[in-house]
Image (cartoon, rainbow, N blue to C red):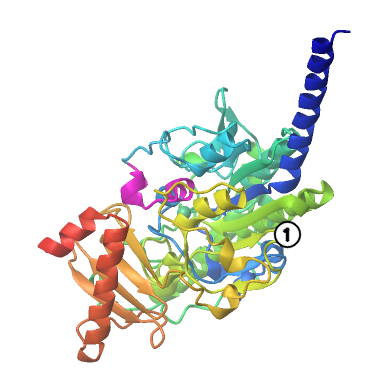
Amino acid sequence: MRLTQISLLAAMLLSGLTHATYAQQRTDRRPNILFIISDDHAYQAISAYGSKLMQTPNIDRIAHEGALFNNVFVTNSLCAPARATLLTGKYSHVNGLEINYGQNFNVQQELFTRILKDHGYQTSWIGKWHLHTLPDGFDSYKILVDQGHYYNPDFISTGADTTRITGYVTNIITDLTEDFLNHRDTTKPFCLIVGEKAPHREWLPDLQDLGALDSIHFPIPSTFYDDYQGRPAAAAQDMTVAKTMILREDLKVHLDYHGYAEYTRFTPDQQKAFAAYYDKVSKDLDSQALTGDALVKWKYQRYLKDYLSTTISLDRNIGKILAYLDSTGLSKNTIVVYCSDQGFYMGEHGWFDKRWMYEPSLRTPFMMRYPGVVQPGAKVDPMVVNIDFAPTLLSAAGITPPEDMQGKNFLPLVEKNGNAQKSGSAKGWRKAMYYHYYEFPQPHHVSPHFGVRTERYKLIRFYGPKDYWELYDLKKDPDEMHNVYGQSDYSSITKDLRKQLDELIAQYKDTEAANILETK
Ligand code: CA
């Protein structure tokens, strides 16, 4: 063998060895990412947040073994815009998706998932995507068509026709998740986003959970009978349990199994089981002949029973995914996040739905387990915004986030041995967050608005058709019932908040908001 042949052989052996070692190192060092984002899951309905309504032991497990974030806020409290912000780390006016319908999300723009893929991660999105344009820059996807259906949903997969899968959506998403993990490329770390449909309207529980909460009488929130005094935008909305919530479609009273898309999909067995339960519900209502406030109260109880019953399945399935990670040894090197796309009203102000900059919809549940990095049981108080998710996950993967991402890596707030999460005022971390909501008039007549929230105060500017300011002192008025804008004892605070608002608008380059403040 000539010397050149020996060198060549040595080089081949060496490169093979290097490649294998590198692959091994990548798997060992860089964490996998499993990001579970549900839809409309209120923190008021999660026991890790002290829920009075519901126990969610499996979701809580992520918080107990990781960190529970107490102040995570969204930039625009709506389904599709929240997903666009998750992917881009940018505000709606920058990533181009401000409303649920009527705008196409540009998937060719910079997405953190594409960056991870370019750096050797295997990436996938399973479940609710809701961005209308198909995913791009993922190794694979299996997404629900549009909002998706609770029963026998249709999925669009990479390079395949749309297929209908028989069963209940949350169970199916878990099966698809396990299927992805079973067949993944084990030489690479993975980033899997699991988009849960539940507990989105119209809250169809799994058959096995029908009636599970029937014996519970849920407490009515103290603000349920809000008269919206001093808040003209709140008075003009169309999202109350009393008036907006529909008996037939939302609460399944006197169901028309042929006239409503969700039910025409049922198999005969599913329809039979569903009818057996909801016919009893309908008879209960008929027998009482309720009107006025008694009917509203009945609707509220039924709303919570249906909504929370869908979360029984959600919690059970998250337990199943966590057990899978345990049984495969993946728990050790996998970041697990559980969050919702935004908060939701469980009857506060008389409402369901989201949209407002008020606390129940501005705040979203968020918890993160990251073995070896996040201190188990940590409670994180500094303000995190959903623009931070993308840069944080990139940082966890050892990638410097692109400069034009508008969020920040929050890992320094939660790292073991760090004390930032206890102090509530991490050095150099944001003390105020910016919000901007757009969708009007349909479907719920919530006037567009933007504003700033600090630790104690919230200043909101509504514009078109309601055009005025609101100010809340969250310490004195955590339920946001008293608009104190214009009161003399808040004049210097208002001035300071206005300055912070102007600075945030400039920082995030929201020219529309800047123009409104200049011209109106
Ligand atoms: Ca949502």
Q: Nearer the viewer, residue 300 or 408?
A: 408
Drawn side of residue 112 relative to residue 520, left or right: right
Residue 259 position within the rendered picture, expressed as x and y whole percent measured from the top left: 45, 40
Drawn side of residue 202 relative to residue 481, left or right: right
Drawn side of residue 83 relative to residue 503, left or right: right
Q: Which residue is mark 1?
A: 371
On screen, residue 424 above or below 438: below
- Of the residues shown, which amino acid type is indicated by label 1? Pro
Q: Could you tell me which residue is drawn at 56 percent across and 46 percent down?
A: 399
* Residue extending furthest toward the bottom: 489
Q: Which residues are magenta?
A: 83-101
Q: Nearer the viewer, residue 314 or 279?
A: 314
Q: Residues within 10 Å of mark 1 (few under 14, many from 20)?
A: some
Q: Nearer the viewer, residue 351 or 512?
A: 512
The answer to whether any part of residue 419 appears in the image is yes
Q: Nearer the viewer, residue 278 or 126?
A: 126
